[in-house]
């Protein structure tokens, strides 16, 4: 049995979309970060780091989007959610690692500058730099999509589930994401996928407003 712990609108949306794309039966367990539910003793037993997503696989816990997305893709090979070529598969994992290690933290600097400086006077600078850096990353994603329907080329993959998260965050940050023609066209293709739409409706995503 699969159980996904996620927060609507957080990076866990990527895993939420991916598990829906597999067609597998799973239980949804929303953890509302704004309410601090990730810090409860109950959830810390699931993920001691107090983060989402977390995937319970028959009592064993897997964390981090990159790992969960790779696990789902390889567990349900008939869905073709990652390339079968070893190099291309590794390239997809590399892109997801970049999302996790570089793109996501830039947005966190913008949204939570207090995490990076205890000095209140320094926090506006942290916030502004984070926003500029995040925008540069969105522009790079737009470039990577040039001439391609999907992040990995002509075929949809779990990498696309992750890439969509940052477009939504760009909207939330009031960045001019509509100027990114390739990324915007990608977002529109994603919204036409039934699994994607189902998850975004359930999470009340800004992409549907």
Image (cartoon, rainbow, N blue to C red):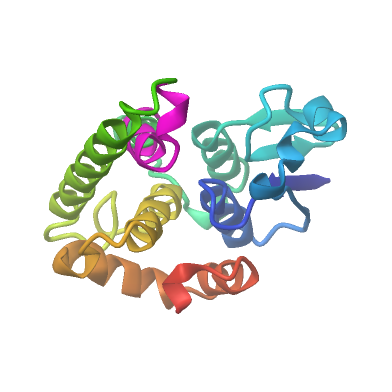
Specify the segment rendered in magenta: 101-117
Q: Is residue 1 visible?
A: yes
Residue 51 located within the stretch drawn in magenta: no
Q: Residue at x 23, y 49 (%)?
A: 138
Q: Main secondary structure of the magenta part?
A: helix
- In the picture provided, is 55 more to the left or to the right than 153? right
Q: So how many labels did they put on this image?
A: 0
Q: Say if residue 6 shows up in the picture.
A: no
Residue drawn at point x = 53 percent, y = 41 percent: 69
Please, which residue is most extreme toward the front here? 121
Q: Is residue 90 above or below residue 13?
A: above
**Residue drawn at (64%, 48%) of the image:** 34
When the figure is inspected, residue 193 is found, relative to residue 23, above or below; the finding is: below
Question: Does the magenta portion include 114?
Answer: yes
Relative to 192, is 183 on the left or the right?
left
Pinpoint residue 137: horizontal percent, then vertical percent. Answer: 22, 42
Examine the image and state in which quarter residue 41 appears.
top right
Q: Position of residue 45 (x, y in %)?
A: 83, 26
Q: Where, by quadrant of the figure, is residue 124 drawn?
A: top left
Viewed as shown, does residue 44 lie left or right of 102?
Answer: right
Q: Which residue is at the front of the view, 57 or 171?
A: 171
Quadrant for the C terminus, please. Answer: bottom left
Seen in the picture, residue 196 relative to 29 is either above or below; the reply is: below
User: Which residue is at the front of the view, 193 or 129?
Assistant: 129
Q: Quadrant of residue 203?
A: bottom right
Q: Nearer the viewer, residue 8 or 109?
A: 109
Q: What's the residue at 54%, 56% (across, down)?
A: 9
């Amino acid at each position: 049995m699969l159980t996904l712990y996620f927060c609507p609108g957080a990076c866990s949306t990527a895993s939420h979309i991916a598990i829906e794309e597999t067609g597998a039966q799973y239980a949804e367990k929303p953890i509302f970060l704004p309410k601090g539910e990730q810090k409860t003793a109950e959830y810390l037993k699931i993920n001691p780091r107090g983060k989402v997503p977390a995937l319970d696989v028959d009592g064993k816990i897997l964390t981090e989007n990159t790992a969960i997305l790779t696990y789902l893709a390889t567990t349900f090979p008939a869905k073709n959610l990652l390339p079968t070529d070893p190099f291309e598969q590794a390239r997809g994992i590399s892109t997801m690692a970049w999302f996790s290690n570089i793109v996501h933290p830039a947005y966190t600097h913008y949204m939570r500058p207090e995490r990076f400086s205890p000095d209140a006077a320094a926090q506006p600078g942290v916030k502004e730099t984070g926003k500029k850096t995040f925008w540069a990353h969105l522009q790079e994603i737009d470039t990577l999509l040039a001439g391609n329907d999907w992040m990995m080329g002509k075929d949809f993959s779990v990498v696309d589930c992750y890439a969509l998260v940052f477009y939504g965050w760009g909207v939330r940050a009031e960045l001019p994401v509509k100027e990114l023609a390739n990324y915007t066209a990608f977002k529109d293709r994603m919204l036409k996928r039934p699994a994607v739409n189902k998850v975004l409706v359930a999470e009340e995503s800004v992409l549907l407003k």
